[in-house]
Amino acid sequence: MLITDAEIIQQDEILPGYYRVTLSAFLAAIAAKPGQFLHVRCGSTLDPLLRRPLSIHAVNRERGEISLFYRIVGRGTALLAGKRKGEKVNLLGPLGSGFTMPVGVSAAVVVAGGIGIAPLYFLLQELSALKTCADVFLGASTSKQLFFTQEIEALGHRIFSATDDGSVGYHGTVVDLFEQNPAGRVYGCGPAGMLKRLSQVIKQNELCGELSLEERMGCGVGACLSCVCKTVNEGNGARYSRVCVDGPVFPAGEVVWE
């Protein structure tokens, strides 16, 4: 398990309250897999006490750099947003179970809701390196929150957009857009309601898929049990899985949505 004091190479405010930070973390960059996360100490004191789990958004292995894309939601992420180039951030990880890379799959499909693109962009980087073109379904409240469209197209992927207000693309939810032509191996991340609906579409159309979940975490290594979610057990029973170590990526049919 890696603990790294990573130097900030760049910190950009993409939209008000939304930031992308790039860190020099060579060993973490080499070890990282799409879908994993870093447990980040956002402050320099014991307030806040707990680290913040942030998805690995992008990796440049040659330069040993990792990028994180996050939104300010509380004191920890606000402190992180206040850090500048040259400052250090303590990282634990990469942690968690990531996405399964496709082998012999004719079509890969990525479905992202809002900031759910955070871990999926790294997946798209790796798919591009494998010469696999993905159909990318991006959903957001409005056009300004459709993140990284030019970068995704530059990787060689095709984008299909959906906005709640109809400002760009399909007027409606991203899952409704995907449901019009459901096919391929599906990778998804976004709000819980969106993932619940996406898992239903995947099941109804007998597709294979994996979903990346977001949960509040304490330790990030499976000890505190603060991030459990209900999953299917053998014999159609249910059990509680730890999102930090058993996930955050789960097969689409494994999560029990309540």
Image (cartoon, helix red, strand yellow):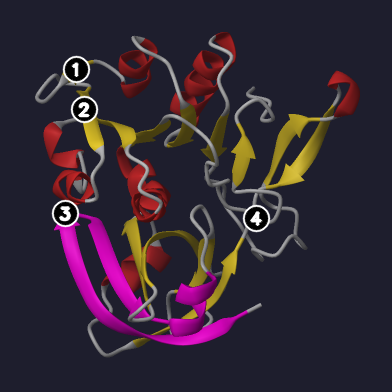
**Residue under the point 48% across and 72% down:** 40
Q: Quadrant of the N terminus?
A: bottom right
Q: Is residue 145 left or right of residue 92?
A: left
Nearest the camera: 173 or 205? 205
**Residue 82 horizontal/vertical position (percent):** 26, 75
The answer to whether any part of residue 47 appears in the image is: no
Asked if the residue at tag 2 contacts the one at tag 1, i.e. Cβ–Cβ closer than 8 Å, the answer is yes
Q: Which mark is residue 206?
A: none
Give the residue pinned by disc 3.
16
Circle 1 residue: 170
- Which residue: 90% across, 21% down? 235
Q: Say which label, 1 or 3, has the lower sequence index.
A: 3
Looking at the image, do the residues carrying marks 1 and 4 touch, with CB atoms under 8 Å apart? Answer: no
Quadrant of the rendering where the C terminus is positioned: top right
Q: Which mark is residue 244?
A: 4
Task: Return the disc, 1 or 4, that comes first in the chain's sequence.
Answer: 1
Q: Secondary structure at mark 3?
A: loop
Disc 2 secondary structure class: strand
- CA gap between label 3 and label 2 equals 21 Å
Identified by mark 2, the residue type is Ser
Closest to the camera, between mark 4 and mark 3, is 4
What residue type is disc 1 on?
Tyr
Of all residues, the one furthest to the right in this rendering is 235
Residue 219 painted magenta: no
Judging by the rendered image, the residue that carries numbered circle 2 is 161
The answer to which of 137 and 124 lies nearer the viewer is 124
Q: Nearer the viewer, mark 1 or mark 3?
A: 1
Whole-percent x and y of residue 220? 64, 63
Q: Is residue 6 left or right of residue 229?
A: left
